[in-house]
Image (cartoon, helix red, strand yellow):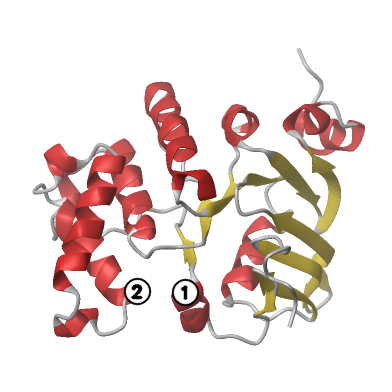
Amino acid sequence: MADSSAAPRLRAHGVSVHFGGLRALDDVGLEVGGDDIAGLIGPNGAGKTTLFNVITGVQDPDDGAVELDGVDISRWSPHRRGRAGIARTFQRLALFTGLTVYDNLLGTWEAATPGAVLGRQRQRGRERVEHVLEQLDLTTIAGRLAGQLSTGLGRMVELGRALCANPRLLLLDEPSAGLDPDETARFSAILRGVAGTANDGPAVLLVEHDVALVMDVCDHITVLDFGQRIAQGSPSEIRSHPAVVAAYLGQPT
C-alpha cells in the first residue's frame, strides 16, 4: 500500500474514457492536496463532468486510476467512495424542497453515517448539523423549507449537505450558477473558510465557469480542452498560458 501520509488527497492519472469514437478524456491526470482548493476549467464539452464521474465512480474509465489518500479506489462503487469521504454537489440544485434546511442537512448526515437512520449517534448528528449551520451562516433559516429559498441560499444549503457527510474530498460542480455578484463573493469567502485541513475541512475540487471566482479561491488549476489536459498551474500561470487563452479565456480586452 502507498504511504498515504505523503500522498495527495486525490490523484487521478492516465484517465481515458471513450464513448464509441469520441474520446471524452485522453490520458488525463490531476492532483489535489489535503489543504487545496483546486480548479478544473475548460470549454463546454472539455470532459470536466466526465472526470468528476470517474472520480466518484459513476463512470468506469477505459484506462487510468483514481487514488484517495494514496489508496487505489478505481474499482470501488460510488457508495463505497462516498462512505470513504468523497462528496459531490451538482450544477442543478438537488435539495429536498419539502423538508426544512435543518432536515436536509440531518438527512445527509444520516445517509453518510452507518447506523444513523436507526437512531444511533443521534446527538452527534445534531451537533454536526448545528456546527455546519453556524459555519455557513444558515442558523436563522434552519426551520425554513428548502423549496422557499433563493438560489443563493439553496447553494449554501447544498454545500451544507455535502459538509454534513464529513467529506475528505469535496467536488463542487458549478456552485456559482445562478448567483449574483454579492452571493458569489459570499460563497467565495465561506468556501475559503471551510476548506483545507487547517480548518478541519475537506480538500476541494471545483468545476466552475466563473473564471474570476476560480482565480480568486483556487490554489492551482487544471485546464481541459477536447478531453485533454492543456495546462496546469497556479492562477497567475493559467491566466497567461497561451494555450488556455486561445482555447478558453480569450484575449484580454
Disc 2 packing (10 Å; few <14; some 14–19; many ≥20): many
Q: Amino acid at mark 2?
A: Ala
Expressed as whole percent of the image width and height from the top left, the position of residue 82 reads 47, 74
Q: Which mark is residue 82?
A: 1
Q: Which mark is residue 112?
A: 2
Expressed as whole percent of the image width and height from the top left, the position of residue 19 reads 75, 76
Quadrant for the C terminus, please: top right
The one of 142 and 25 positioned closer to us in this rendering: 142
Q: As drawn, which residue projects farthest toward the top? A: 253
13 vs 166, left or right, is: right
Quadrant for the N terminus, please: bottom right
Query: What residue lies at 38% left-to-right and 58% top-to-bottom?
Result: 162
Looking at the rendering, which quadrant does residue 47 occupy? bottom right
Query: What residue lies at 60% left-to-right and 39% top-to-bottom?
Result: 209
Q: Amino acid at mark 1?
A: Gly
Q: CA distance from mark 1 to mark 2?
A: 7 Å
Expressed as whole percent of the image width and height from the top left, the position of residue 200 reads 45, 51
Above/below status of 244 relative to 63? above
Along the polypeptide, which appears first: circle 1 or circle 2? 1
